[in-house]
Structure formats: structure tokens, C-alpha cells
Amino acid sequence: MTIADELQSTIVQMVQPGKGILAADESLPTIARRFAPIHTESTGENRRAYRTLLFTAPGIEDYISGVIEFEETLAQTTDEGTPLSEALARRGIVPGIKVDRGKGPLALSPGDFITYGLDGLAERLQQYKTRGTRFAKWREVYAISKHSPTAHGISASAEMLARYAAICQAHGIVPIVEPEVLMDGDHSLARCAEITETVQKEIFYALHRHHVVLEHMILKPNMVLPGSAHTVKVRAEEIAAVTLRVLKRTVPAAVPGINFLSGGLSPEDATANLNAMNTNFPHVPWQLSFSYGRALQQPVLQAWSGKPENVALAQQALLKRARLNGAAQRGKYLPSMESSD
Ligand code: 5MM
């Protein structure tokens, strides 16, 4: 099999109608923040138990085509001793991994962030592959303020994403390219649209310079939303219209899949927004789906609460959100399904 064949077969398995991606790649500080409200300590064993619960939830393979794991998870096993990645692969779910090493301030550029982790990436990918990993994810983060992100910050982050994506493809790993324009702040929908458009234009220019094959990547963007402290509530139809306007202006038709992050939206809003996009824009060239972390996991964490006796209930909560988002991918979600499901 050539590298191109390998990438193509992974894309075919990941981009399927009615299916999306589960982001379960929280780094150690992030998972500790997720566990805190349910009074669960972030020990290695608790993280293993929680991710086992997620990955073995009955029925999710009907709606989830890939799972993004954190590096630690690759070495962890189910209670029966099956490596967690293998447990996914056996059910036809593609195992992937977050390969960035987190973000920090971009030096001499106040307000801008940059993500670390390119050094040694090629060697790490080779190791991950031996454990069944077939795709990767790298996130660049953009905070909106009066003066940020700057043109320089946007350009530096695009270069990182493109270099990462090129290294992945050279090793037969499908790259998920994740530029996240944060919801934090009181900015308007129009300001988020302006920044998201600039960010994505710069990214596709950089991907072109770095010879990244667009057919063999997935874009994981934010939806275009007003800031979380903005006073005006915007309807799902408007979010869909503005998000699609930005995507049509920036994302080439060669990209097979756009899988949104949820970015702090409630599970219901994340599903409703995705549904509005697929209902109102059924003829776009890419598959519009989800790659949610919080919007899939929030009800699961609440149901689990760190207690073994709640595992089955928590798995049902995951299956419910996966099924409703699967429906939203097809434009078949109705809010009434929240209570009837
Ligand atoms: C933006 O976060 C990504 C998508 O999750 P949401 O749907 O909750 O927004 C997520 O994949 C994120 O990249 C991972 O949770 C890793 O985050 P950290 O901050 O731990 O690197």
C-alpha cells in the first residue's frame, strides 16, 4: 500500500455520513479541570476508567468514526487487558492522537498564542503508528481582543499547522488541522467572522506552500459565534449562515470533511448549530460534522461522577449525544429528540 492509499483509506473510514469524531484528548491539566466538578481526582487509574467507559460504550460505533486520544491513553488497557486503541479499532472506530504539546504566548507578540511540539514529531508518529494510530490532531488557539490576534500571530500559527500536517502526511497519518478562535470575550458575531476568515485563509495558503494534500486532511474549526460575554443571543440559523459564508470563502472543495469543535457551547446548542448547517446548506462540497469534546462528554461526566456503579448510565448518555449529533450531521435533528430519546 502506498502512503497515498493509506491516507485515503483512513479518510474514507473517518468521513462517513451520520458519523463524527469524539475528542477525548484532554491533557492532564484539562482532564483535572473536567473531573473537579464531579469531585473525582485525576489519577492515572481514574483517567483509564473514564476513557474505558467512553471507548467501550455500546453502540457508539454507529455514530462515531474516530476518537482523538491523549498520549497517555495509548499505553492504557480496558479491564480485560485490551489496549484502548485496539478496543476502538475492533469496532471500526479509527484511533487518533493529539500530538501538539500545548500552547503558550508567542514571544514578543502580546495577545498571540503559539503551540509547541514539532521537534521530534516524525519519530513520535512512527511510535504511535506501531500502536494503531492512524490520524493526528494539532490545535492552534486565537484569542479575540481589540488588538489580537495580530497578523503576525495568525501567520506564525498557520506555519505551525502546515508543518505539522506535512509531517503527518509524509508518515501516512491523516492530519486534523484545528484552528480554534476562542469564544471568550464580548466580541460580536461579525468580529468572530472577520477573524475566522483571516485565520483560515492564512492556513490554506500555508498548507499549499507546504505541499499538504487537501484530500487527505480534515479541518476542525470553530463555528462562527459571538463572544460568550456578548449580550445578543444569536439563532442557530444565523450562526449556520455566517459560518458557511466564511467556510465557502476559505476552504477549498478538495477538503473532504469539516468537523467542528464545540468550544464551550452547551451540548444542545452544539447539536442544533450543526443541524442548521446541514439542513440549510445540504449541497456544500465537504461533509459537515462534529469533533466535539465537551459537547459530547459533559452529560457523561455528570452521569458517571467517578462511580463504577454509574458506568452504564454514563455510556447511555454518550450514546444519546452521539446519536443526536449523528442526526444533526444528516440534518435530521429536532429539539424534541432531546426529551424523547
Ligand atoms: C477545543 O478543544 C478541542 C475540542 O473540544 P471541545 O469540543 O470541547 O471544544 C479538544 O479536542 C481539545 O483540543 C482537547 O480537549 C485538548 O485540549 P487541551 O487544552 O487539554 O490541550
Image: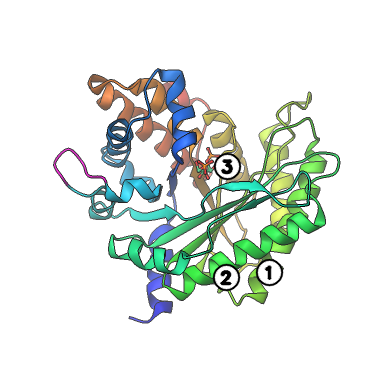
- Mark 1 or mark 3: which comes first in sequence? 1
Question: What mark, if any, has residue 178 been given in the picture?
Answer: none
Whole-angstrom CA distance, mark 1 to mark 3, is: 27 Å
Task: Give the secondary structure at mark 1.
Answer: helix
Task: Give the secondary structure at mark 3.
Answer: helix
User: Dividing the image into 4 quarters, which one contains the C terminus?
Assistant: top left
Question: What mark, if any, has residue 214 been given in the picture?
Answer: 2
Q: Are marks 1 and 3 in contact (CB under 8 Å)?
A: no
- Count of numbered marks: 3
- Quarter of the image for residue 322 reads top left
Categorize mark 1 by other alpha carbons within 10 Å: few (<14), some (14-19), many (20+): many
Q: Amino acid at mark 3?
A: Leu
- Quarter of the image for residue 173 reads bottom left
Q: Which residues are magenta?
A: 76-81
Whole-angstrom CA distance, mark 2 to mark 1, is: 12 Å
Q: Amino acid at mark 1?
A: Ala
Magenta stretch, overall SS: loop
Task: Give the secondary structure at mark 2.
Answer: helix
User: Could you tell whether 272 is left or right of 78 in the image?
Assistant: right
| Residue indicated by mark 3 | 274
Q: Amino acid at mark 2?
A: Leu
Whole-angstrom CA distance, mark 3 to mark 2, is: 23 Å
| Residue indicated by mark 1 | 206
194 inside magenta stretch: no
User: Could you tell whether 126 is left or right of 36 in the image?
Assistant: left
Q: What's the residue at 45%, 22% (across, down)? A: 36
Front one among 259 and 298: 298
